[in-house]
Image: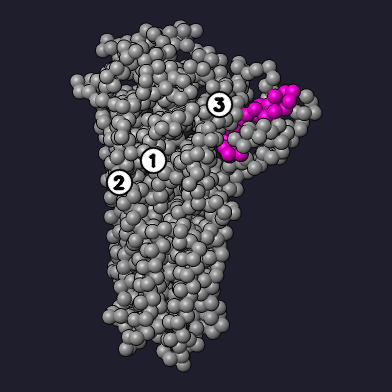
Amino acid sequence: MSRVDKSMSLAGGPPVAMKTGQKIGTLLGLFGLGILTLATFNVSLPNQGLWLSLALLSIGVGILVYSKSLYKDTLPGIKNHGVWLKSISNRGFWAWVAGISLTGFYIVLYFFAELLGQGSGGAENTGLIGLFDPLSYALKGQPASQWFVYGTLYTLAILAFGIKFIWKYRHNTYEKIRTGSVMFFQTVFAFLIPEIMARLNGDLPYYDLKNVWPLNYYLFDQWNVDALLINGSFGLTLLIWGIASILVITPILTYRYGKRWYCSWVCGCGGLAETAGDSFRQLSDKSRMAWRVERWVVHSVLVFAVVTTTGVIHSYLGDGSKYWFSQSTFLISVGVVLTLIFGLIWKYKRHELKKDARYGAIGYLVIILALIGLHFSSTTNTLLLFQTHEVRSTYGFLIGSVFSGVIGTGFYPIFGNRVWCRMGCPMAAILGLQQRLFSKFRITTNGGQCISCGNCSTYCEMGIDVRAYAQKGANIVRASCVGCGICSAVCPRGVLKLENADTKGRINSKDVLLGNDVDLMALVNQK
Amino acid sequence: MEHIVIIGNGISGITTARHVRKLSDNKITVISAETDHFFSRTALMYIYMGHMKYEHTKPYEDWFWKENRIELKRGFVESVDTANKSLQFADGSSLNYDKLVLATGSKPNKFGWPGQDLQGVQGLYSKQDLDLLEVNAPNKEVCKRAVIVGGGLIGIELAEMLSTRGIPVTFLVREDSFWNGVLPNVESAMINRHIKNHHIDLRLASNLKEILSDEHGRARAVVIEETGEELACDLVGLTAGVSPNIDFLKDSGIELGRGIKVNRLLETSAKNVYAIGDCAEQREAIGNRRPIEAVWYTGRMMGEALAQTLCGNPTEYKPGHWFNSAKFFDIEYQTYGWVFSERNKKDYEQHFHWAHQDDTKCITVAYHKDSRLFLGINTFGIRMRHEVFDRWLTEARDVDYVMANLKQANFDPEFFAHFENSINQAFANQLQTA
C-alpha cells in the first residue's frame, strides 16, 4: 500500500494541510516570481527599481511568512513530519516540476543568457537582467549581468531559507551558528565585497575571497591572473591570497576542524545546499554502489582539475620573461610538491588506507605522467594530444556549468542537495583527503546507545551510511562528511557528536559494544 | 559445519547471526514470519510520521545477507520438535537444525478488556501493526479521535505518531503520573506537562473499562472505569506493555515461565536450544535487572554473548552496568546505572534533582545516602556520555566526584549551553540544607 501523497498540493495534503499563513506565504512568493517572469518576457515595467524591490521583497517575505506559519505553533524539536509523505520531498510530481524548472533556469542562465535580456556588444540590458540594472548600478556602478542576477537571487535564497532553517532547528545552537555563518559569508564575501571591490577598482575581476581553487577553477587562468596583475599590488595580494588559501590556510583549518569549516560554514555551494536544499537532504543515495561511484568520480575530477590547471598555467608561462616562473620551473615545482605529498601519505598512512592507497597511487601517476607529457610536448599549447584550452573549456563546461549548476542544483529535488559536493567538487575532494588523513575532526558515537533506527543515515545529505558506524560504536571519519551536524540533531537517542580532539585513536572499530560483559568486549575487540 | 537456525530476525537474532558468521563457517538460517529482512523495530514510529520509509529502517542493504551467507527464510514456525531437531511451518514444510536459537520477541499485552478484539483496536509492535495503523488511522478524517491505553514507552510514541497527522489523542494512563513506576515523580511530572504541551488529552489515573462496538464490529467508543465517561473514537491503541511471544512452544517440552526459561549461558531446558532477547526469561534475575528484559540493547548483548557459545566458546550473558534511553516527544531521556522511582526505591537510595526553568531539561542523580556511592543518573534534555558513566560506575565513584566531573560526561553538540555550574550550585545548596 502506498502512503505517498499523490495530490498536487504544494506543501501538504494529508497528513498536514496548508495553514492560512502558508497559503499567504506561497502567494507572496509566487507574486514575486511572477514579476520576474513578466520581466523575463520583456513586459515593460515602468520604474524598474520599484518593481525589482517589490519582487525580491515578495519572494523573501513570502518564504519567511510561510516558514513562520509552518513552525510557530510547534515546540522546538525535530521537524521531519511527513517529509516522505509529501510530493515535493519524496520525488513526487512537484519534485519533478521543481527539478525541471530549476534545470531549465540553469540551462538558460549558462548558455542562453540573451533570453534573459543580457545586452551584448554594448547594447542595453532588457528583460530580467534589465530589471536588475538599478541594483547593479547602486552597488557597483555598472549594468547587471546574468551573473549579477544569479548572485542576487542566490543570496536571497540563502538568506530567506537560512532563516527558515534556523527556525526549524531553533533548539540546536550548532545549526543556528553554522547557518548564520553561511548566510554571512554568502552575503558579504560572495555578494557585497566583490561588487564593491569592482566599484572601487573597475578593472578588477570578480573575486570571491572565500572561493578557493580548485572550486574556483579559473583562478589561475591567464585572463584572470593578468586581470589581477594589472591591478598592481592589490591584485597581486589577491593572487597570493588565492595560492595561500589552498596551500596553507585550507590544510590548517581542515586539520583543526575538519572540512566542515569550509563545506558547511563558508562555501556558497554548501550554503545553498544547507538552506534552500535542506528539504531535499534525505534524497541522497546511501547505497554501497553510490559510495563506490562517488569515490571514483570525485577523485577523478580532482586529478582532472590539477592536470588541466597545470596545463593552462604551463601554456601561458613561456620562458620566464613575462612571469617569474618559467615553464620548466613550474612543472618541476608542481611535480616536487605532489611527490612530497604523496610520499608522506604513502609513508605514514599506507596501512590505514589499505586498498585506497593504491588508488591514490594511480591518481598520482596520472598526474606525473601528464606533467612529463606536458614537458616534452612540442608546443606549449597541447596537453598530451589535446589542446590545453580545449580541455580547459570542456572542463569549465562539464564541471563548472553542467555539474555544479544544472545537475548539482537543478536536480536537488531528485538526487538530494549535495550531489555536486559529493560527486563533482574537486575542492571537496582535496578537503576530504585532508580530513580523512590528518584531521582532529570526527563524529563520535555514544557507547552502546544506538537503536539502528536510521534517522542519521536518512538525513545525511552526503549519502554516508552513518548508522553503519553508529551501531558498531565506531567513530565516523569519512572524507565526504561536511560536518553539517544533522545526523547528531535527528538522532533520537543522543548517540552522535561532532568533535575536534586528539588524532590518536580517531579511527576505531568495535565488534562488541559498550554494555556487555567487559571480558567479552575485550575478547571480541582485540585485533 | 553445523546448521544454526534462528527464529526471529530482530536485533537479537540478527546480532547472533552476524557474530556466528564472524566466528565460524556454520550454516546459518534466519526465519521470520514478519518481514523478509531485518529492520529496526524502534524506527517503526518514524515510518508513520513520514521521517523515513520502511527501506530506511533496514540497517543492512539486501545484498548483505547473501554476501555473508546468512540464509533468510520467510515462514511461520508452528511447532518445534526438539527430539528430532526439526521445525514445522504453518505451510506444512519443515526444517532441521543442529542448534536452534529462539529470538521471537514480544507481543502486545491484552488484559481481557471487553471489546479488545474489535476492529480498530490494535497494539504497536510489528510491521503488520504499523500497516494496520495505516488502515485504521491514515488521517484525521478517517480517525477523528484515538484513545491510547497504557502509559509506557510505546504509548507515548503512539501518541506522538498520531498527533503528527493531526489526530486528536486521548491518553489513558493507569498510574497517577506518566511512567512513574520507573521515573522519579519530578521527572514524571515534567513529562506529563510536556505531553499536554503537545495537545494530548492526558488522563492520569484512568483505566479502560470496555471498548464499545458499532454495528459493523468496529470500535466506536471506550468507557473509562473511574468516571464512566464514554469517549467516541475510531482507534484504540493498546500499549499496556508486552509479553514474550512463545505460544508456538506450548507443546515443545521446552520449559516456559512467562518467557522461555534460560540459564546464564542462554540455554533452555532442551539441549541445543537457546533463547535470547525479549522472549527469554532468566531463571534468576541478574542484579537489579528484571528476569525478562524487553529492551533493544539487552537483545543485542545476548546475541553477542550467545554467538560465542554457539561457536565453541561457552560465554555467559553478563550484562554490564544498566543503561537505557528513550524519547518523549521532543525530550530525550538517557539513564546510566540505577535510578529508581519513589515507588521502587530502596531506603538507602537518595536523589539529587536539578531542573532547568524551561521545563524540558532535568537530571536526577541517585546515590547511597551513607556511603555516598554514585548509583546512577537520569538525564532529560542533556546528552551524556555512556563511556564516562560506565567507567565511573565500575570505579565505584562517589556522588561528589561525579558532580565535580560532570562536564567530562557531557555529550551535547558543540555550542550548546552547559549547565554544570548551575547543577553544582544546586547540589551544594542541597548539601547545606540537608
Q: Secondary structure at mark 1?
A: helix
Q: Which residue is mark 2?
A: A91
Most foreground residue, B292 or B327: B292
In the displayed structure, A372 sits above or below B109; it is: below
Tell which subunit mark 2 falls on: A
Horizontal and vertical percent position of residue B154: 44, 24
Q: Which residue is mark 3?
A: B191
- The residue type indicated by label 3 comes to Ile
Please report the residue visible at 50 percent of the width from the left and 48 percent of the height from the top: A508
Residue at mark 2 shares a chain with residue at mark 1? no
Q: Quadrant of the N terminus of chain A?
A: top left
Which numbered dot is residue B267? none
In the displayed structure, A166 sits above or below B177; it is: below
Residue range in magenta is B365-389
Horizontal and vertical percent position of residue A378: 32, 89
Tell which subunit mark 3 falls on: B
Q: Secondary structure at mark 2?
A: loop
Tell which subunit mark 1 falls on: B
Foreground: disc 2 or disc 1: 1
Foreground: disc 3 or disc 1: 1
In 3D space, how far apart are the residues under numbered discs 2 and 1 (Cα atoms)? 39 Å
Q: Is residue B41 visible?
A: no
Q: Which residue is mark 1?
A: B22
